[in-house]
Image (spheres, helix red, strand yellow):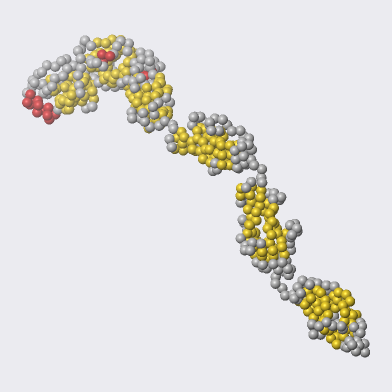
């Protein structure tokens, strides 16, 4: 039997009891304090008795101990300054799916012919049930033939009663067949039809500031879709699904069934600043001689940042940047995306051209570098020998002379050209011996040092010869006088020191340091006066034959002098004393 513990106490006493034993509850979301006691009125449900100083009505939703209850008793009159009623626990939260707009309703369920354990699976595979819930704007959305699922079992609404007990809506339903679109896991009828899938743009799509793009999606035709962006400073999306890219960054775009976040899809989009490509082109040489090459380098930038391995095309064009230059004038080779080599093969007139580098993905983006191409001119070489020696054309014995060369081609000096050096005689062909002069050193600049080694005893004129290595018909000569070593010359006569009256004899001469011719003469013993003691019968540059006079009273025995004088230098001579003797 029910016990009314606080049935007849006055308001003041009840307030005291309420302050001591009352529990915090909410009534339709409003916090209040009430006494909650058990009741034995209905064994199949978790019913409780509610006593409070505030009024409430049937159908009000009570939250107690985190559980929801509904007031099921008649409207309460105030008795003894307090209100009383019966509340029943709502163990089920049923999801009604109206075109993917979910309505969640708390309810309790009863069967027509047999009871149901609270919160457990219905034991009958088919049959009818009554679903009781608060009569409000949510329950008023339910219509006949609406389907719902309880504990993975589908039902269909066959009746709706809001009159039997005011404030409570009673739904009559019967077991229905499971549909392939039923979401049994989440207990939502036709829930699998509510999937939303964004098909365009693709996830991680890249947009440029100022771009727009419509979101394309798949969803139930009856579902209303709303859109949102989590970073509206980067990209916005309007109610029609139009994305507008505003600034560089990342934003998540979401498409969702209205009032139902359970069914949504999202993509990430990336927004970048618009491409602004430029190409920088350089050349290590911008003027080329015939058959000379230049290395061309290019770098592609996007908004000032180098772009690695951007595909480009190299061309040689005229000033209009369109007309290509013939390969008979210039040729490109060794082409990569970063560099190429230009070879000047121009045999016509001088040309001013441009090396144009174009971005393959956008032909309006290009860079260029000007190039002057000189034309082919036949080689016209010349060699000139120079020296800093003083005197310029004379070299004393044992002295060294430095010599270099200038090589010209069509009047232009070409320092990289080399010559072969030699020392030749007056015929400009025969090499001179080492006893006159020699090249003692040639340095890395193709310059030489010539030393005078002339020991011939006389000055010698010779030529320093320079022959161009590329063309041995190109020659220059430089004349040099090599003065001989200063050597003292001497003459010595060999032969008998006596000659017999009327006899003939021969004497020879030796000249140092080398043999030279002499002239012969006879003098008295005083080396000054003439003599009659002998006569020269024959002579050569190196010998003389004398015939002695006949000794007589007029030509007595005695001495005379034989003189040999150097033909090349009369200051060099010698005397040889000979005695004239008689036969007896």
Task: State the image coordinates of residue 417 (x, y, percent, origin top left).
Answer: 64, 51
Place of residue 383 in the rendered image (x, y in percent of width and height, measured from the top left): 66, 52
- The residue shown at (83%, 76%) is 520
Q: Is residue 248 above or below residue 522?
A: above
Q: Residue at x 35, y 17 (%)?
A: 223
Q: Position of residue 348 (x, y in %)?
A: 63, 36
Image point 51% across, 36% down: which residue?
A: 368
- Residue 529 image position (x, y, % from top left): 81, 83
Report whether 292 appears left or right of 550: left
Q: In the figure, 510 relative to 432: above or below?
A: below
- The answer to whether residue 460 shows anywhere in this view is yes
Q: Nearer the viewer, residue 553 or 35?
A: 553
Report the side of 107 relative to 539 (left or right): left
Relative depth, front residue between 223 and 529: 529
Q: Quadrant of residue 196?
A: top left
Residue 178 visible at all: no
């Amino acid at each position: 039997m029910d016990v009314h513990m606080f049935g007849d106490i006055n308001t003041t006493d009840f307030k005291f009891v309420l302050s001591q034993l009352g529990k915090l509850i909410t009534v339709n979301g409003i916090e209040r304090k009430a006494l909650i006691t058990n009741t034995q009125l209905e064994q199949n449900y978790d019913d409780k008795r509610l006593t409070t100083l505030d009024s409430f009505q049937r159908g009000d939703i009570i939250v107690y101990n985190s559980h929801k209850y509904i007031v099921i008793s008649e409207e309460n009159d105030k008795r003894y300054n307090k209100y009383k009623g019966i509340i029943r626990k709502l163990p089920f939260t049923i999801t009604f799916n109206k075109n993917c707009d979910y309505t969640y309703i708390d309810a309790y369920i009863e069967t027509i012919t047999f009871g149901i354990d609270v919160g457990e699976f219905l034991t009958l595979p088919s049959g009818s049930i009554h679903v009781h819930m608060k009569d409000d704007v949510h329950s008023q959305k339910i219509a006949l033939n609406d389907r719902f699922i309880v504990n993975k079992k589908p039902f269909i609404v066959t009746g709706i009663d809001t009159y039997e007990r005011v404030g409570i809506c009673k739904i009559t339903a019967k077991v229905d067949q499971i549909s392939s679109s039923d979401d049994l896991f989440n207990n939502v009828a036709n829930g699998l039809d509510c999937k939303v899938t964004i098909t365009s743009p693709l996830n991680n799509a890249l947009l440029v500031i100022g771009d727009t793009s419509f979101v394309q999606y798949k969803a139930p035709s009856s579902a209303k879709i709303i859109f949102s962006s989590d970073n509206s400073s980067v990209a916005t999306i309007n109610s029609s699904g139009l994305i507008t890219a505003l600034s560089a960054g990342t934003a998540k775009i979401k498409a969702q069934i209205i009032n139902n976040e359970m069914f949504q899809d999202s993509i990430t989009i990336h927004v970048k600043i618009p491409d602004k490509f430029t190409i920088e082109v350089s050349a290590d040489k911008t003027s080329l001689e015939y058959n000379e090459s230049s290395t061309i380098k290019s770098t592609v930038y996007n908004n000032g940042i180098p772009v690695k391995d951007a595909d480009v095309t190299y061309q040689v064009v005229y000033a209009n940047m369109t007309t290509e230059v013939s390969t008979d004038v210039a040729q490109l080779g060794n082409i990569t995306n970063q560099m190429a080599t230009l070879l000047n093969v121009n045999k016509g007139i001088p040309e001013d051209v441009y090396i144009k580098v174009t971005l393959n993905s956008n032909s309006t983006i290009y860079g260029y570098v000007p190039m002057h191409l000189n034309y082919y001119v036949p080689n016209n070489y010349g060699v000139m020998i120079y020296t800093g020696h003083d005197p310029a054309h004379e070299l004393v014995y044992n002295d060294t002379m430095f010599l270099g060369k200038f090589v010209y081609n069509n009047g232009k000096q070409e320092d990289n050209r080399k010559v072969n050096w030699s020392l030749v005689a007056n015929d400009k062909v025969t090499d001179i011996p080492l006893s006159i002069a020699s090249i003692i050193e040639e340095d890395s600049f193709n310059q030489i040092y010539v030393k005078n080694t002339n020991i011939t005893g006389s000055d010698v004129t010779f030529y320093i010869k320079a022959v161009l290595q590329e063309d041995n018909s190109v020659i220059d000569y430089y004349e040099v006088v090599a003065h001989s070593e200063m050597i003292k010359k001497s003459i010595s006569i060999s032969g008998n020191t006596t000659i017999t009256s009327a006899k003939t004899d021969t004497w020879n001469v030796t000249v140092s340091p080398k043999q030279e011719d002499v002239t012969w003469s006879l003098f008295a013993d005083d080396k000054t006066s003439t003599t009659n003691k002998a006569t020269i019968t024959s002579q050569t540059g190196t010998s003389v034959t004398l015939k002695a006079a006949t000794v007589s009273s007029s030509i007595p025995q005695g001495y005379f002098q034989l003189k040999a004088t150097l033909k090349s230098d009369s200051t060099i001579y010698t005397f040889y004393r000979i005695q004239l003797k008689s036969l007896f």
